[in-house]
Image (cartoon, rainbow, N blue to C red):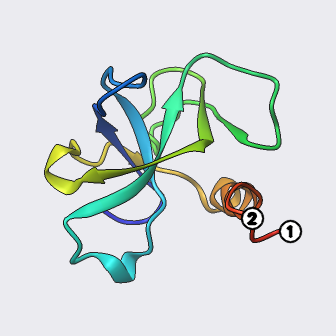
Amino acid sequence: MKRGDFVTVAVQGDYGKPRPAIVIQSDSLSETDSVLVCLMTSTIRDAPIYRLVVEPSSENGLRHVSQVMADKIMAVRREKCGPVIGRLDDVRLLALNRMLSLIVGFAD
């Protein structure tokens, strides 16, 4: 599991149904027992500052047009993550990096 990979997670609480998520944690932290992810949704919102639209493809393994919810960052135990289903392309990963820098305040 590497940064930019899509996995399936089921977190507790309001977002608890099984859903795709994208790994955003640095690959240099691969020994930790948890991993940071952004949850995905197929409910599309007009929110280009913090929602990244991803079309399904054979490379990313998604089944529906979805959005990365950059505002929904979660730590998930690695054993609670499903296998890698695909990977985000480099262009969209760069766009996600920019969104995350805004969300966590690095862009302030």
The three-letter code of the residue at mark 1 reads Asp
Q: Does residue 12 appear left or right of residue 49 in this picture?
A: left
Q: Secondary structure at mark 2?
A: loop
Residue at image coords 21%, 42%: 82
Q: Position of residue 14 (x, y in %)?
A: 42, 22
Residue at image coords 44%, 74%: 26
Q: Residues within 10 Å of mark 2 (few under 14, many from 20)?
A: few
Res 106 quadrant in image: bottom right
- Give the CA separation, mark 1 to mark 2: 5 Å
Figure check: 92 above or below 49: below
Q: Does residue 93 appear left or right of residue 107 in this picture?
A: left
Res 7 quadrant in image: top left
Figure check: 107 above or below 43: below
Res 100 quadrant in image: bottom right
Q: Position of residue 104 (x, y in %)?
A: 67, 61
Residue matched to label 2: 105
Q: Quadrant of the C terminus?
A: bottom right
The three-letter code of the residue at mark 2 reads Gly
Residue at image coords 52%, 20%: 64
Q: Position of residue 42 (x, y in %)?
A: 56, 19
**From this viewpoint, which residue is outermost toward the bottom?**
28
**From this viewpoint, which residue is outermost toward the left?**
79
Tell me the number on the disc at residue 91: none
Residue at image coords 35%, 26%: 13
Tell me the number on the disc at residue 108: 1
**From this viewpoint, which residue is outermost toward the top?**
43
Q: Position of residue 88 (x, y in %)?
A: 53, 51
Circles 1 and 2 in contact, beta carbons < 8 Å = yes
